[in-house]
Image (cartoon, coloured by chain):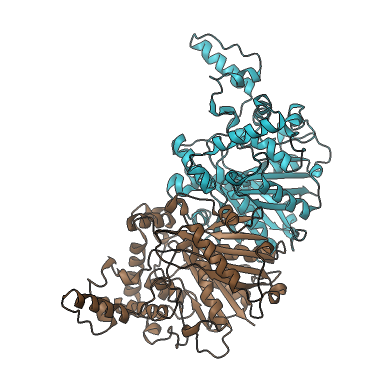
Chain colours: A cyan, B brown
Amino acid sequence: MKRPRKLGRGVALVGVGMSKFGMFRDRDSKDLFAEAFRNMIASVDKGADPQDIDALYVGNFSNDFFIHQAHWGPIVSDLIGHVPKPATRTEGACASSALALREGIFAIASGFYDMVLVGGVEEMSKRSTEEVAEGLALATAPYEGRAAFTFPGVFGAVATAYFDRYGASREHLMNVTIKSHNNAALNPRAQIKATIRSMMESKRRRASEKGLPEPTWQDEKEFLRDQDANPVVAWPMHLFDCCPISDGASCALLVGEELARRFTDAPLYVVGMGQGSGSGFHAADDLTTFQATKYAAEEAYSMSGLKPEDVQFSEVHDCFSIAELIHMEDLGFFKPGQAYKAVEEGATRRDGSKPINTSGGLKCKGHPVGATGVAQLMEVWEQLRGEAGERQLPIKGLRIGAAHNLGGTGGTCTFTIFERR
Amino acid sequence: MKRPRKLGRGVALVGVGMSKFGMFRDRDSKDLFAEAFRNMIASVDKGADPQDIDALYVGNFSNDFFIHQAHWGPIVSDLIGHVPKPATRTEGACASSALALREGIFAIASGFYDMVLVGGVEEMSKRSTEEVAEGLALATAPYEGRAAFTFPGVFGAVATAYFDRYGASREHLMNVTIKSHNNAALNPRAQIKATIRSMMESKRRRASEKGLPEPTWQDEKEFLRDQDANPVVAWPMHLFDCCPISDGASCALLVGEELARRFTDAPLYVVGMGQGSGSGFHAADDLTTFQATKYAAEEAYSMSGLKPEDVQFSEVHDCFSIAELIHMEDLGFFKPGQAYKAVEEGATRRDGSKPINTSGGLKCKGHPVGATGVAQLMEVWEQLRGEAGERQLPIKGLRIGAAHNLGGTGGTCTFTIFERR
């Protein structure tokens, strides 16, 4: 970075919406985006007229692969009655809609537009699990996917390296998973709305109903150690270390900062933003850090003048449990090799010093990849506006929240910091 | 449009480069992009240090489909030594890199960055012609491609509607083709560097060498009427109405306006830019106009304060001959239904009143779809700087040139106007 980052015009977030996330045999990308759009419009306190939207950006990873349809800009534009105004698709793997967010910010900050819609969509579940793995591997660096190094394998290697370097173990990853499930159980929008304990109970009940011997797990970790309950995917990544396959859409409304209070008395302001790129793991000297996340954070902290400790809570890209640990270190929330200890001590819980993924994260909220970047804003929006219900953070003077999104094997990372003033 | 378009900070173009365009069995997207990048850097008069590039945008339509690899932002970033700085892929079908250009402009105009690389790439020829048609159909609106309404068929229907409404015929389309070939013969970068006359000659020579009867075509139109020489693809689109299948890459360098003269004494300034979206032909009342092009033009003219008559020459998206005619009308260069007459009278030739596609256009320069939007800048750059060699326009006070790019069946259109000051 040759100079500090700044925007010539401030940008504010005045509405956010999501579709349901899940595996839907009977719903398509258009249907899901329409739901997210309706929810977003409904979230604008003083109302917004869709006719005032100047341009839209939609993140989509590869509906090209998943449902044989590309060019989602104009499809979404047509869907919401936006034609003939501009519509652009951005793609950065699982960070596709974080890139839409960024371009929406630039478009307004440039002075060209006043109101921009940003969102994302992905429709994955009509493909088999094997095909989803193949499709997602299109996002790896060329030397990875073609060598059959798909995502669970990649993050399995990352976890192994982290364990080796810092003395962590599977037991520490379990803490991440348990926390995510505890948060998601309180999130009505989560795809998996259940604590590990409640899942244990329902498995016991089902065994009992079938007259089978009831499992004897004493606690969540015993459950997660059980190879039948939590089978290995790519060691040490087990089923509960991995986010689910999801369909879904997300949507947010951005306006020039000076216009924000026409739409709500509680807008969120974009105070920091950053993006980085990475070469992929075939070229990495160190598997325990994502250089793209570090660069994204450097830009965002530069623009905001904030430090990691000023970020009161954050959504952090947890496609796999190990990713949450490493990204928290790369974002400066914890020192290298310390995140797993902090998680064990409860620092990232809702009542901890640095609550992370209060939404339940990708692990439980779901991860329709192109929709995730903007969907992360939902939690930041609700928390900073005091609308997170049972998940509401008990922090006095809650003011600064952030979202971190990863695409591919670290190829694309973004970090965006919002402030409630 | 609710208010005139403007940018808070001006943006200038200080370098442009292309790879060779063609069908290359032995070259891949990375190789092609590297060539475009090297040529771009070499085009910067006073030199540019790639380390000063703050961010990059790369347009790619669907290497997802063509070569089973998505997420081209970080691949290009890695290729040019740009990691860990940001890299974003934009997709708008055949207008993918025009969207990269636009986002590069916004990123600088916002004040966030000072120097941004924009480019595009596509690798199509490793697929069969049938597979290319299938892949391109991913860019149509959902009701089109799935009904087997692929691009030659779509533009065949457009041509039929235009003929019916305005009394044009295939003979008029031939004028477009002949002009494109005449220009391309003078463009060392064209994929098809041949006039129709020279192609007639070589076919005659080949017949003679084989001892076959020599064809007796008297002129270009007789050649183009010959079903053997110019077979039908989707009536009235014949082979010579269609652009070729191409591999290739393109690259351009943008900087803040106030920095431009550090890099060259002859920068081009972005004085107008616009983008529009369309619903596709299944929803069109009128097949003889592209509403997305009209909207893009409206934005660009609004920003620039210019009128269509002020644009001294333009590259216009001619994926099919009929597209060039209709877009020229939508851009305001000619009145509806008049373009085919103007072409017949020579208005769009290099010595005409409104030279169009002096590069040879997509028809002859080639159309690696994701690369096209930025590749169009090559011609604008050379013409406005007086570097177009034998193609150089004989216009006194040549100052304003433009590029128009179309994606899908009118789903995405852009128009960008440049000025040499």
A181 above or below B197?
A: above
Residue A103 location (% of width, % of height): 63, 57
Quadrant housing the N terminus of chain A? bottom right
Residue B294 location (% of width, % of height): 50, 71
* Residue under the point 69% across and 51% down: A14
Front residue of B26/B130: it is B26
Answer left or right for B19 relative to B245: right
**Residue A323 figure quarter:** top right
* Residue under the point 73% across and 43% down: A331
Front residue of B39/A118: it is B39
* Residue under the point 61% across and 26% down: A194
Front residue of B285/A409: it is A409
Number of marks:
0
Q: Residue furthest right?
A: A396
Question: Visible in this render: residue B14?
Answer: yes
A125 above or below A411?
A: above
Residue B248 location (% of width, % of height): 47, 64
